[in-house]
Amino acid sequence: MSFAYVSLTYVLACVVAWWTFDASGGGWAAASLAGLMASTAVTIVASLAVNNGSVFDPWWSVLPPVAALWLAVRAPVLDLRTILVLVVVGLWAIRLTLNWARGWPGLHHEDWRYEKLYREWPLPRWLTLVLGVEVVPTLIVWLGCLPLGAALSGGGGPMGVVDAVAFGVGLMATTLELVADEQMRRFARTKASGDLMQGGLWRLSRHPNYFGEMLFWSSLLIFGLAADPGAWWAGAGVVAMLGMFIFASIPMLDERSRARRPDFEAYARRTSALVPWPPRSGDREPAGR
């Protein structure tokens, strides 16, 4: 029942977003902001109806590919750059959506990060849900999607090495996230209470999945710059993503791990927060991890 409720919500959200993209005048920046915010209005209503902000979770991986597809359909030509961008966005979206679906317990549960926001923000719960859980992330994703306007215009410069770099970075992003997800999933099946994942990619980075996210949004920016070198301003999305991870997501997760896992402090001292890097010396790594 929970999955059906969320699925119907996103069918409606996608339809509303597509219609709003069509109805909006002006350039891609204005149209994408209107369409993405309109889709978020649908998820806000659905979230408030069941008093659960986790209804918004799939939005992150569902609406960006809708935006990319809308642009591609309206481009004057279906060129190779457009195809490569759609492949990168599609693979990223499939991986992230499947990861959500495999781990989502249903509407009887709400993400602990949202509960933390409800407790700490000096606003009513419903307003924190609207602003902190849904509107602010929508604005960050909107910034991240800005390069799509240049990359999928069909009128950019010829394909070249920069496009190949963008495609490679995008594939690397999804591959890294997929490997990190599967390593964590296998660990979670056998771990005891208080155990800390310190193997595989997690030996090199405390948050390799977030690094993969940074690579994905960076690949969109590189595609945009390949099509239009003057679109440097679209880098605001990568900056916004990086700021969200460094100042919000990573500190929140590290604080939780520090309180729940006795090995975390030593692990944090030797392990990069974001970029995968060989562990620093000074603390012994546990055997067999």
Image (cartoon, rainbow, N blue to C red):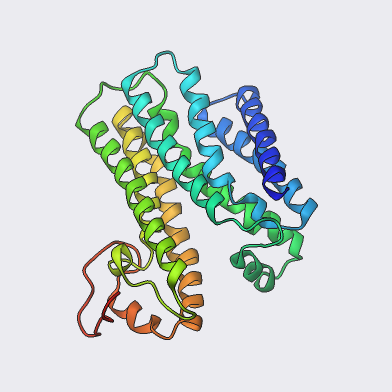
- The residue depicted at 41 percent of the width and 63 percent of the height is 186
Q: Quadrant of residue 218?
A: top left
Which residue in the rendered view is the most extreme toward the top? 76
Q: Which image quadrant: the C terminus?
A: bottom left
Judge from the rendering whether residue 168 lies leftward or rightward of residue 77; answer left or right.
left
17 vs 55: above or below: above
Count of marks placed on residues? 0
Q: Is residue 59 left or right of residue 51?
A: left
Along the line of sight, the residue nearer the viewer: 208 or 136: 208
Q: Toward the viewer: 4 or 246?
A: 4
Relative to 123, residue 25 above or below: above
Residue 70 spot, x, y in % from top left: 53, 25
Q: Is residue 134 above or below residue 61?
A: below
Q: Nearer the viewer, residue 139 or 204?
A: 204
Q: Measured from the top left, where is residue 215 in percent x and y?
A: 34, 49
Q: Residue furthest right?
A: 49
- How far across and how far down the image is residue 234, in percent? 41, 40
Using the rendered view, name the quadrant where residue 32 is placed.
top right
| Residue at far front of view | 190
**Which residue does the image show at 66% across and 62% down from the upper left?**
110
Location of residue 165 in the rendering, given as x and y in whole percent from the top left corner? 24, 38
Q: Residue at x 28, y 22 (%)?
A: 157
Decide if residue 219 is on the left or right side of residue 54: left
